[in-house]
Amino acid sequence: TGYLDGSIILWNYSDRTEIQNIGVLDSSVVSVTFSTNQRNLAALSEGTHIRLWAANFADDPTIYTSQLSNAITSVVLSNDGSIMLTALANGKVTKWFTTDMAKVELGAHSDAVNVVRISADNNWAIS
């Protein structure tokens, strides 16, 4: 779960216990997502901050953190955690490769993008 203070808590929902407080963003958490294989976790704040973690939550599990130039509106991870898509308020959609955080802009809408998703086979994106 993500909170107004920017904190993110990982829960075991079967027994309703808190597993770990895994991080703090710069402002209220807007969205969090796991890769289906539970290898990575990504979160974004209501501002322009995005953070990617390795889901083993070691001493420093952060893989990547960035302050983008435009407000992030949506984030999603592929099933295997190798791809992250972000949508921005300026209409841009970006594909990130989580192994090295290289990025490719997929294109832009004429207005803000509110949501992005990746197909199960990682071949398609929708925004």
Image (cartoon, rainbow, N blue to C red):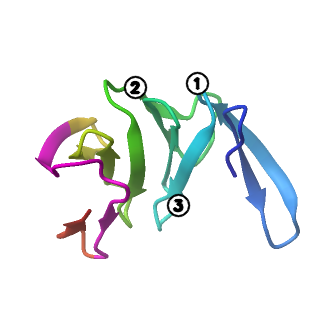
Residue beneath the point at 25% across and 39% down: 90
Asked whether the residues under the numbered discs 3 and 2 touch, taking CB atoms below 8 Å apart as contact, a structural biologist would say no
> Which structural element holds mark 3?
loop
Mark closer to the observer (3, 2): 2
Residue 15 at x, y percent in the picture: 88, 69
- Residue pictured at 26% horizontal, 62% vertical: 127
Eye-nearest disc, 1 or 3: 1
Tell me which label, 1 or 3, sits earlier in the chain: 1
Viewer-nearest of discs 1 and 2: 1
Whole-percent x, y for residue 125 in the image: 22, 65
Q: Is residue 68 above or below residue 119?
A: above
Q: Secondary structure at mark 2?
A: strand
Q: Tell me the crowding category of disc 1: few under 14, some 14 to 19, or many 20 or more residues within 10 angstroms, Cα based.
A: some
Q: Which residues are magenta?
A: 103-120
Which residue is the site of mark 1?
26
Q: Is residue 67 left or right of residue 46?
A: left
- Which circle's residue, 1 or 2, is located before the other in the chain? 1
Precedes in sequence: disc 3 or disc 2? 3
Say what secondary structure mark 1 lies in: loop
Q: Is residue 108 magenta?
A: yes
Q: CA distance from mark 1 to mark 2?
A: 11 Å
Image side of residue 15 versus residue 43, left or right: right
Residue with the most extreme front position: 111
Q: Residue at x 24, y 67 (%)?
A: 126
Quadrant assignment, res 16: bottom right
Residue type (three-letter) at the residue carrying disc 2: Ser
Asked if residue 90 lies left or right of residue 10, the reply is: left
Q: Could you say which disc has been placed on residue 38 in the image?
A: 3
Q: Is residue 12 above or below residue 26?
A: below
Q: Locate residue 17, reporting x and y percent.
A: 88, 58
Residue 28 position by quadrant: top right
The residue that disc 2 covers is: 66
